[in-house]
């Protein structure tokens, strides 16, 4: 369980990215589907819609909702940035930071983690390597997510990289570690948990699945198996 009992572990976080299947009305529909599966299976599930849909999704569901990014700013003249206070006010539980598709330098991530701490947002910092996981763990985010960029959206699961994951767990210390990239099957979820992960961060394996309900239900049941 993470700070403030806002998120139960192990968890599956479904990142909506900016796929056509889950923006606007469809974002709400998918979030409600994820919530229904959480109720049916008893698994801890969360969603990360695009930031434009954040408020409407937070209004529609009771499961944890994460922003996909916030900026390390305070109030002021920062046109186009994502204010952490606004994300909190929208109803979000937390935010992803430093996803491979929105990577930032070390000091920017450090400042963003601190801003999240100040406003009460959970921070999930994505790391591209074992080395990064150690660097980010020193910042004391609420969670880390190891996602090798070369595996994101592919057919090879990060859970096949057993030595990498074991080393990342050791480097993360007491910070709970998720993994992502290529996670698609219940076997992948089992493998991740067996290796010491506290959940998975995934996207296309659910969002782009022919049957998202069936895909996520199988993954959710694996969390509690």
Image (cartoon, rainbow, N blue to C red):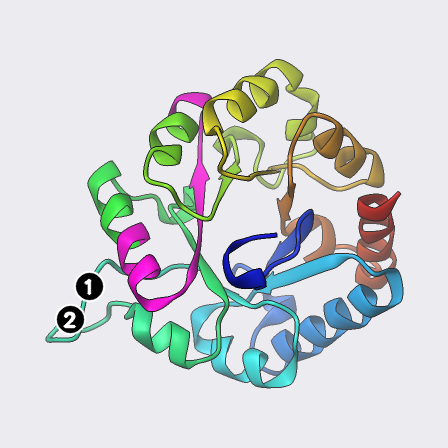
| Numbered label attached to residue 120 | none
Q: Position of residue 9 (x, y in %)?
A: 66, 49
Give SS at disc 1: loop
Q: Tell me if label 2 and label 1 are in contact, CB under 8 Å.
A: yes
Position of 147 relative to 220 (above/below): above
Vertical relation: 68 (above or below) 86 = above
As helix, strand or loop, the secondary structure at mark 2 comes to loop
Q: For mark 2, what is the residue?
A: 78
Residue 41 included in the magenta stretch of the image:
no
Residue 49 image position (x, y, % from top left): 54, 67
Q: Quadrant of residue 176?
A: top right
The answer to whether residue 15 is left or right of residue 111 is right
Q: Which stretch is magenta?
A: 113-131
Please name the residue shown 61% across and 41% down the image. 153
Within 10 Å of disc 2 (Cα), the crowding (few <14, some 14-19, many 20+) is: few
Query: Label 1 crowding class (10 Å Cα cut-off): few <14, some 14-19, many 20+?
Result: some
User: In this view of the protein, which residue sits in the foreground, 22 or 91?
Assistant: 91
Query: x, y (%) of residue 182?
Result: 66, 36
Residue 131 sits in quarter: top left
Q: Residue at x 72, y 58 (%)?
A: 44
Q: Judge depth for marks 2 and 1 and give the one in front.
A: 1
Q: Which residue in the protein does label 1 denote?
A: 73
Q: Is residue 172 above or below residue 103?
A: above
Q: Is residue 119 magenta?
A: yes
Question: On the rendered structure, is 84 left or right of 152?
Answer: left
Residue furthest out toward the top: 163
Q: Position of residue 52 (x, y in %)?
A: 44, 76
């Amino acid at each position: 369980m993470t700070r403030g009992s806002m998120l139960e572990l192990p968890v599956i976080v479904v990142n909506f990215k900016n796929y056509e299947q889950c923006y606007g009305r469809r974002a709400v529909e998918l979030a409600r589907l994820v919530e229904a599966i959480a109720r049916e299976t008893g698994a801890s599930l969360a969603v990360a819609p695009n930031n434009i849909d954040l408020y409407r999704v937070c209004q529609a569901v009771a499961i944890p909702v994460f922003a996909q990014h916030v900026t390390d700013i305070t109030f002021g003249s920062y046109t186009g940035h994502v204010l952490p206070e606004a994300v909190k006010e929208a109803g979000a539980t937390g935010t992803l930071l430093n996803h491979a598709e929105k990577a930032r330098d070390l000091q920017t991530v450090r400042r963003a983690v601190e801003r999240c701490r100040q406003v009460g947002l959970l921070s999930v910092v994505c790391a591209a390597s074992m080395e990064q996981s150690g660097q980010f763990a020193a910042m004391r985010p609420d969670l880390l997510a190891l996602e090798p960029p070369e595996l994101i959206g592919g057919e090879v699961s990060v859970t096949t990289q057993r030595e990498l994951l074991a080393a990342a767990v050791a480097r993360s210390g007491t910070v709970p570690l998720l993994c992502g990239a290529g996670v698609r099957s219940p076997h992948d979820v089992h493998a991740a948990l067996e290796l010491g992960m506290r959940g998975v961060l995934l996207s296309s394996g659910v969002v782009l699945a022919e049957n998202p309900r069936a895909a996520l239900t199988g993954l959710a049941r694996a969390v509690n198996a």
